[in-house]
């Protein structure tokens, strides 16, 4: 019989330690403990690791070889989006967040804070102004967590179990949010109409068990929701909360969701001065009105002005600390979670640098270039837009040839044409970093590829058939 392997530095690999841990959680085996992990995600083999490298220089060479396989958007023309975006990061942002008093992911504590609390308070204030909301948290781990927490808040506020998902959501985001809230909430995906929410379907699905109507704007396909006010009115009439997931990059020109009746606004700040970094520097925000019923359900940290013992002086510190899991520990409503405080400071620097005029100009550029790209691609024979909604930064097209052929042809030319979202469908993203010449180059690539390939009739999308 083979003796069980016990790692010299990992004591819980010992059989008796493992048995004690399983007994503590009431599981008979490791497989039972991980029962929620789908079989498709389990690795039923040993890790595919290279032979041990005995010298540091050999390890350095191996890692350099791995890194050399990557290609950044500075090397290749990219139309990739889907949650991580190639926006310009001003040099001053990197300069500020590289300072030693800021360079940590955590929010810090008073005894070691050297302006970090103030910087985060200013970030919160700038985000609140951009979003037309009163209260914004210190960034959560990412936008996925922020969306899940916003829905969990709605569930606690209403004491109801059902959430209506009324717009297209990134599959990875929907999966992560579902995992986070499934113990308390059930998510019900409703059909969309012309890229945005189907109001008739939403009204028909609302009932006294609905905690929240969740809408993404821009959606996973970049569609800007035009019926937020109607969705808010319908949700509120049913006693539900309107939770909006969004990207703040467009609110220099678009009306923020709060003005249309949104109760909780969540999203990611990666677009605000954060690099892509092979997967993105991400941080989530949650914004609410100055209503104790909502503020006291926010699990993450809030920083505000505080008076000191010295007359006329003030400082910065936690607001309503007693609502957090730091105060309640395991009795808390929800955990504070991993902060992305450094990214909050980066976004604060970015917003302060851009100002209202800069954000307005950026929003106008994004709308204009998105529309130019839509017209350029839909002018190609056999290529069509999937809906008529207003789009910001991203949109989908249906192609007369498989989308994989377009991607393969583009990569051969140093271009990433977009994300494949269907056999004949491509999600295309443009930002202020994408020039008109870049868009023309993509259009030329698609025109040449579709002209030289045999035509296949693309299937009609269900919502288009309606």
Image (spheres, grey):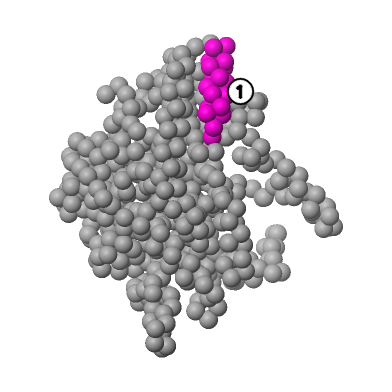
Q: Is residue 84 left or right of residue 304?
A: right
The answer to which quarter of the image holds residue 165 is top left
Q: Does residue 437 belong to the magenta stretch? A: yes
Q: Position of residue 380 (x, y in %)?
A: 47, 16
Q: Position of residue 43 (x, y in %)?
A: 59, 48
Q: Is the stretch drawn in magenta largely helix, strand or loop? A: helix
Q: Residues within 10 Å of mark 1 (few under 14, many from 20)?
A: some
Q: Nearer the viewer, residue 238 or 97?
A: 97
Q: Is residue 80 above or below residue 99?
A: above
What residue is at 39 percent from the left and 63 percent from the top? 125
Is residue 421 something that shows in the picture?
no
- The residue that mark 1 highlights is 409
Q: Position of residue 240 (x, y in %)?
A: 21, 53
What residue is at 49 percent from the left and 79 percent from the top? 110
Quadrant (top left, top right, bottom left, bottom right) of the N terminus: bottom right
Magenta residue span: 434-452
Q: Is residue 351 above or below residue 321?
A: above
Q: Is residue 14 left or right of residue 393?
A: right
């Amino acid at each position: 019989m083979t003796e069980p392997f016990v790692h010299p530095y990992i004591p819980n690999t010992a059989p008796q330690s493992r048995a004690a841990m399983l007994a503590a959680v009431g599981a008979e085996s490791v497989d039972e403990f991980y029962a929620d992990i789908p079989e498709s995600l389990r690795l039923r083999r040993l890790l595919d690791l290279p032979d041990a490298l005995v010298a540091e220089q050999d390890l350095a060479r191996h890692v350099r070889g791995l890194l050399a396989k990557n290609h950044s958007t500075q090397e290749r023309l990219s139309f990739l989006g889907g949650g991580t975006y190639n926006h310009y990061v001003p040099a001053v942002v990197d300069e500020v967040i590289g300072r030693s008093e800021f360079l940590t992911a955590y929010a810090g504590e008073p005894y070691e804070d050297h302006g970090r609390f103030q910087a985060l308070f200013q970030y919160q204030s700038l985000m609140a102004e951009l979003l037309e909301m009163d209260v914004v948290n210190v960034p959560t781990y990412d936008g996925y967590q922020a969306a899940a927490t916003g829905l969990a808040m709605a569930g606690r506020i209403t004491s109801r179990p059902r959430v209506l998902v009324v717009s297209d959501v990134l599959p990875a985001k929907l999966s992560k949010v579902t995992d986070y809230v499934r113990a308390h909430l059930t998510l019900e995906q409703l059909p969309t109409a012309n890229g945005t929410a189907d109001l008739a379907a939403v009204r028909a699905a609302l009932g006294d068990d609905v905690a929240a109507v969740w809408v993404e704007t821009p959606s996973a396909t970049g569609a800007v929701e035009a019926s937020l006010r109607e969705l808010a009115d319908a949700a509120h009439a049913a006693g539900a909360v309107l939770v909006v997931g969004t990207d703040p990059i467009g609110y220099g020109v678009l009306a923020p969701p709060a003005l249309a009746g949104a109760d909780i606004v969540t999203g990611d700040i990666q677009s605000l001065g954060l690099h892509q970094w092979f997967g993105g520097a991400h941080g989530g925000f949650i914004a609410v009105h100055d209503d104790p019923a909502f503020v006291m359900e926010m699990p993450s940290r809030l920083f505000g002005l505080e008076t000191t013992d010295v007359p006329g002086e003030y400082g910065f510190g936690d607001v309503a600390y007693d609502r957090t899991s730091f105060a309640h520990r395991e009795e808390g409503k929800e955990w504070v979670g991993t902060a992305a405080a450094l990214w909050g400071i980066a976004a604060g620097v970015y917003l302060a640098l851009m100002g209202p005029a800069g954000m307005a100009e950026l929003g106008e550029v994004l709308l204009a270039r998105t529309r130019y790209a839509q017209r350029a691609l839909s002018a190609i024979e056999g290529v069509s837009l999937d809906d008529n909604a207003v789009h910001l930064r991203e949109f989908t097209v249906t192609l007369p040839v498989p989308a994989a052929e377009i991607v393969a042809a583009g990569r051969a030319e140093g271009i990433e044409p977009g994300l494949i979202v269907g056999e004949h469908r491509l999600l295309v993203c443009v930002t202020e970093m994408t020039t008109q010449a870049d868009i023309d180059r993509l259009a030329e690539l698609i025109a040449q590829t579709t002209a030289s390939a045999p035509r296949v009739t693309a299937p009609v999308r269900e919502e288009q058939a309606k």
